[in-house]
Amino acid sequence: MSTLLVTNIGELVTWDDERPLLNDAAFIVDGGTVAWFGQRNEAPAADAVRDVGGAAVIPGFVDSHTHLVFAGDRSAEFEARMTGQAYEAGGIRTTVAATRAATDEQLAANVARHLAEMRAQGTTTVEIKSGYGLTTHDEARSLAIAQQFTEHTTFLGAHVVPAETEIAAYVALVTGEMLERCAPYARWIDVFCEDGAFGADESRAVLEAGIAAGLLPRIHANQLGLGPGVQLAAELGAAADHCTFLSDADIAAAVDSGIVLGLLPGVEFSTRQPYPDARRLLDAGVTVALATDCNPGSSYTSSMPFCIAVAVRDMGMSPREALWSATKGGAASLRLDDVGHLGVGAKADFAVLNAPSYVHLAYRPGVPLVVG
Ligand code: NIG
Ligand code: FE
């Protein structure tokens, strides 16, 4: 196996406990993992050398929340929102119709296109949900397609109740036949716990059925208003994403249970809801992840640097906290310890920036800084 020395790194972010940030650094990749990192002038010899010319190097982003299996877009809905219309979860059904009508090849090509966008912006690990099929057949094929691209797949049959169905019958389907068909393709179970989607009892039923089928729980919680989602997540040990509206009791429950809360700034950007207060969470001691929620309705961005910039500008995070949440925080949300950092033993998933420091990710919003 040949080794690679990545060297002349102006600023290296490792998130190692002792040396989280190094200047004038280097690291060695052996067999796809980080075998050594340290000061450039102390680097051991390697079979090949990559000189990055003083650039900053960061761990690849871990995007812990995306809905990439879909067809069509909803730009008309976005345009209407920008002139005053409110976001409604019901718009999801528009994408459901387009997704059901698409072929497997079209859906897979769409996932590949969005993943290519993500990779070009520094993302190296991606979670992908189903949730735009809402029949047993369409949810199972959505997950089979997602699984072609990532091992971090999530069954979100409980995204909304499809137009043709009554809620109790739909929950029975999701927790019964649909779960049975989908579980082999999924690592996670998810539910959209919100007024207009699924209530506390239905959400609990969905997550408990998924857990019984061997899946790990995650939840869309507290996006559009206060609600029971984060408390339920704390009780079940689920990662909770959105978390825009939180009571003090929700935050206390998150701290006590140690669950990871995921913030999705692209949603508030694109729905004109208020941004979540990351500072309040961090000051309370919550582990925070940042993710894109890439989907054609509430957040059609594939860019983790965009999310970092918004989190720094409008959610009270420092650039360093935002980068941590977009890398190590995302890994924590997905319960992974070999990505989101560049310590010894980590996967050598990294991004070289056309910048001297990671701070430029927020300082230069909208600028394509990732060079590979
Ligand atoms: O995570 N919140 C629920 N689901 C998606 C929105 C999907 C859509 O609008 O199509 C989300 O924001
Ligand atoms: Fe989502």
Image (cartoon, rainbow, N blue to C red):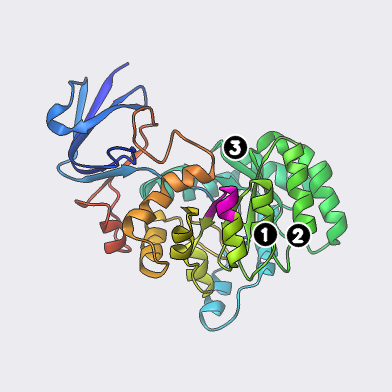
Q: Answer whether residue 307 is magenta in the image.
A: no
Please give the name of the residue rendered at 57% of the width and 56% of the height, measured from the top-left corner. 241
Label 2 SS: helix
Amino acid marked by disc 2: Ala
36 and 49: which is toward the camera: 36
The label on residue 200 is 2
User: For the residues carrying marks 1 and 3, which lies nearer the camera in this image?
Assistant: 1
233 and 34: which is toward the camera: 233
Residue 192 visible from this viewpoint: yes
Q: Which residues are magenta?
A: 254-261
- Locate residue 146, reporting x and y percent: 59, 42
The label on residue 229 is 1
Quadrant placement of the C terminus: top left
* For the residues bearing labels 2 and 1, Cβ distance under 8 angstroms: yes
What distance separates the C-alpha of mark 1 from that of mark 3?
27 Å
Please give the name of the residue rendered at 15% of the width and 27% of the height, measured from the top-left corner. 42
Write down the residue under mark 3: 147
What distance separates the C-alpha of mark 2 from that of mark 1?
7 Å
Amino acid marked by disc 3: Gln
What distance separates the C-alpha of mark 2 from that of mark 3?
29 Å
The label on residue 98 is none
Q: Determine the quadrant in which ligand 1 lies.
A: bottom right
Which is nearer the N-term, disc 1 or disc 3?
3
Q: Quadrant of residue 217?
A: top right
Which is nearer the N-term, disc 2 or disc 1?
2
- Locate residue 86, reporting x and y percent: 60, 78
Please give the name of the residue rendered at 66% of the width and 54% of the height, measured from the top-left corner. 99
Label 3 SS: helix
Left or right, 181 with respect to 362, comes to right
